[in-house]
Image (cartoon, rainbow, N blue to C red):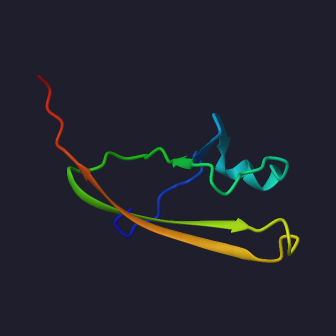
Amino acid sequence: MDDEEVDTTDATLLLGGNAYRLRELSRLSHVWWFILDPGAFFVPLTKEVEPGAHHIDATLITVEPYITAGRFSFYHRDRRELFVEAWRKK
């Protein structure tokens, strides 16, 4: 985020009503993610995020399991802007 690496040790993939730890994904070849099913990543932050605009870059690498038996990887890059408002106690 904002040109800083984020610790993904506790990152989680939310898929089909289940939560999978990012570090466990390589052992979950029996779990299928259909191409049209939505998924989301949750990455807990270890420090407070300052108010204002922040840029988030991510890359998801998927492997095609059918025709080429997993010989090809596809890189899906995304960049989003997150705006954090200042929080005030009432």
Q: Can you give x and y, in whole percent of width and height, for residue 76 in the image? A: 57, 70
Position of 26 relative to 13 (above/below)? below
Number of disc labels: 0
Is 20 in front, or is 44? 20
Q: Is residue 51 left or right of residue 25?
A: left
Q: Can you give x and y, in whole percent of width and height, for residue 30 in the image? A: 85, 48
Could you tell me which residue is drawn at 50 percent across and 48 percent down? Answer: 43
Is 78 in front, or is 5? 78
Is 42 in front, or is 67? 67
Q: Is residue 37 left or right of residue 54?
A: right
Q: Can you give x and y, in whole percent of width and height, for residue 63 in the image? A: 75, 67
Image quadrant containing the N terminus: bottom left
Could you tell me which residue is drawn at 69 percent across and 66 percent down? Answer: 62
Could you tell me which residue is drawn at 58 percent across and 45 percent down? Answer: 10
Q: Can you give x and y, in whole percent of width and height, for residue 77 in the image? A: 51, 71
Residue sticking out furthest to the front: 36
